Image (cartoon, rainbow, N blue to C red):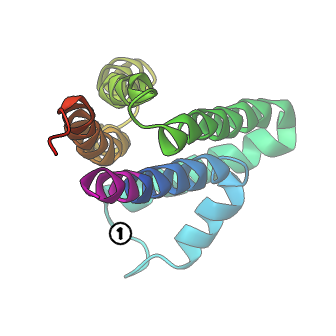
Amino acid sequence: MEIQRLERSIRAWIAFFVIALILSGVTAFALETELGWLLANWPGREGGGLYSWVSRTHEALKDANIRYPFLAYGFDWLAFAHLVIAVAFIGVWRDPVRNKWILVFGMIACVMVFPLAFIAGAFRGIPVYWRLIDCSFGVIGIVPLVICYRKVEVMERLRRRPVVG
């Protein structure tokens, strides 16, 4: 009974993680449109460094999509990678104990967001506050994975426990 409860909980967390991963990936397909919508609906209209950065990014994307549309292909691959990684977590859904390694892979990937954001972000001139936003994906992502990992460890202990009766 306890194992079934743990499995249901793991599946709920994995569903949340996979949906978040898919949504964050799919947004890469229509970035110019999404940023345009965000700017049009910006609370308080123009103001602040974040608005300026999003506006500048939107203008750069518009220009690149007009002059160099093939560059958007990189965003397509980014979105595709998110979808492929999401598929890997089906293994955890199906058999959390046997596929615990997928959780480890995901947690490592979440931690790797930090050096990428701070090293590549600095090199590319990305503002620190935006790099922190990028890092939030790693923080948000690792939470359900750690929860699932701990639950899988409990499931492993329960399965090893001898049945008394």
Residue 23 location (% of width, % of height): 58, 56
Write down the region rendered in magenta. 1-10
Residue 37 location (% of width, % of height): 62, 71
Residue 39 location (% of width, % of height): 54, 69
Task: Work out which quarter of the rendered image holds the N terminus and state it.
Answer: bottom left
Q: Residue furthest front?
A: 165
Q: Is residue 128 magenta?
A: no
Q: Is residue 133 visible?
A: no
Residue hosting label 1: 47
Q: Main secondary structure of the magenta part?
A: helix
56 left or right of 129 in image: right
Q: Nearer the viewer, residue 34 or 153?
A: 153
Q: Is residue 9 magenta?
A: yes
Residue 70 location (% of width, % of height): 85, 31
User: Label 1 amino acid?
Assistant: Gly
Secondary structure under the numbered disc 1 in the rendered image: loop
How many dots with numbers?
1
Task: Work out which quarter of the rendered image holds the C terminus and state it.
Answer: top left
Residue 61 lies in quadrant: top right
| Residue that appears at 39% across and 59% down | 8
101 left or right of 27 in image: left
Vertical side of 4 occupied by 61: above or below = above
Vertical side of 95 occupied by 102: above or below = above
Q: Is residue 108 visible?
A: yes
| Residue that appears at 83% across and 33% down | 68
| Residue that appears at 43% across and 78% down | 45
Residue 131 lies in quadrant: top left
Mark 1 Cα shell of 10 Å, populated few (<14), some (14-19), many (≥20): few
Q: Nearer the viewer, residue 58 or 73?
A: 73
